[in-house]
Amino acid sequence: MADWYSNFAHSGFGTTVTKQLGLPRPGVLRRYEPGGPLLEGPAVVGSAGTGRLRDTVTAVLRDAGVTVVSPVVADGDASGEKLGAVVLDATGVTGPADLAAAHDFLAPAIKRLRANGRVVILTDPPAAADSPAQAAARQAVDGLTRSIGKELRDGSTANAIYVPEGAESGVAGPLTFFLSGRSAYVDGQGVTLSAADVPATQDAAKPLAGKVVVVTGAARGIGASIADVMARDGAHVVAVDIPAAGDSLAAVANRIGGTALQLDITAADAPQRLVEHLKERHGGVDVIVHNAGITRDKLLVNMDAARWNSVMAVNLQAQLDLTEALLDGDVLNPGARVVCVSSQSGIAGNRGQTNYAASKAGVIGMVRAWAPTFAERGATINAVAPGFIVTEMTAKMPFGTREIGARLNSLQQGGLPVDVAETIAWLSQPTSAGVNGQTVRVCGQSLLGA
């Protein structure tokens, strides 16, 4: 769906008007294209603290075909080749004074960042710090990353990776995701890694080749986009939706060469039916995407029980029931991935959506609580929390509400269903084994909520 304002702002007349009036000009986001380069320019890598990951980061970049250049030394020098990415290794910081090196490296480098550039900062988790000063320095990276994301323009983003001792093998997956066009609408976010058995390599073009992926709510919107991206990445997709959406569901499955399964996920026998289907037709499953969800909006004081119960049943209880059945049914293949769709509303809340926000916040709690169980099986469970995503539903919103929702983020525009799909596909990859129990917001760093 076209963004009228962005198109206007980038037209000849619109460029003049926006400059004269000081209006924002949303960047044209660089999204992933199969076969394209990881970055549209070289990367520079610097360090603050001991920087134990600098060599690892440099090796990952070079293996991905990225040219790594020397750091910028003159704070006032914005000349020279434009950079595709700026990566700071801030592991080993011991106190706030160490962050001066972060400033000295980042300030001149970011001046040379090209449109759709990337800033990624790596550090140790604050929770594992040995002292309050060390915890303060590590936590400072969060504020630093979020603020950089709000200062960048032209589609550039900033994100952070927290890497505890023993989790170094998991760096490549999130680093390449945050640098790539897959993360076009992910900004100001942080992911904490955990120790895991992470494969050294995977097929860059078809990272999900041979995988069986289940996507619920796949008949339209974000669910259909998830199915498209999973199939593009090599997976066989089992597209699931209610019988009433049968025609649309079949169209999606046919388009991607997958299979359709008509199933009301809130039915009492739905978990067992899904388990039996996966065992009989596919011998197991590699990825489950809990995407199905509904809204039944009303102010809490005016909300009837039917609205409350239906939202909880679809958005939360069904995810719990299906996941538990998959665990108990011995149907999850080794290295399985479960990705649950939460929402920005589950983090920030939203007027008139107490039922929806509660259900989506519950998804985040469920993911966090189940992460250790999945880790014991060599599997992962994570969540994505979309912000304002342009869909047929948002197109029906009043003009003012829609425009405010689309512009109130660091990227000054709404995201697309493919942005959510790309993040889910990344969490489903083999090299994402070190990402577990995390919630990644796909919201362009919305100014609403945390």
Image (cartoon, rainbow, N blue to C red):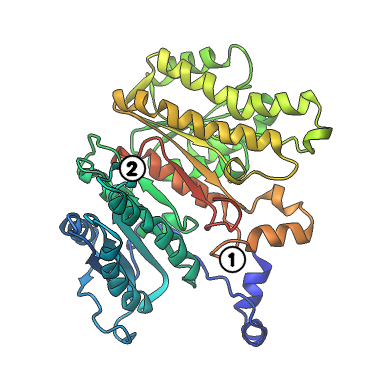
Asked whether the residues under the numbered discs 1 and 2 touch, taking CB atoms below 8 Å apart as contact, a structural biologist would say no
- Asked whether the viewer can see residue 406, the reply is yes
Q: Residue furthest right?
A: 302
Cα–Cα gap, marks 1 and 2:
33 Å
For the point 75% across and 57% down, the residue is 401
Which dot, 1 or 2, sits closer to the camera? 2
Q: Nearer the viewer, residue 103 or 261?
A: 103
Q: Which amino acid does the dot numbered 1 rest on?
A: Gln
**Closer to the camera, 257 or 116?**
116
Q: What residue is drawn where x is 65% and y is 65%?
A: 3
Q: Mark 1 highlights which residue?
A: 412
Identity of the amino acid at label 2? Ala
- How far across and down, in percent of the image, does residue 203 sit? 27, 45
* Residue 450 locus on image (x, y percent): 54, 50
**SS at mark 2 in the image:** helix
Badge 2 is on which residue? 127
In the rendered image, residue 30, in percent from the top left (x then y), is placed at 45, 64
Closest to the observer, 275 or 397:
397
In the rendered view, would you say 288 is above or below 28?
Answer: above
38 sits left or right of 67 in the view: right
Q: Quadrant of residue 410?
A: bottom right
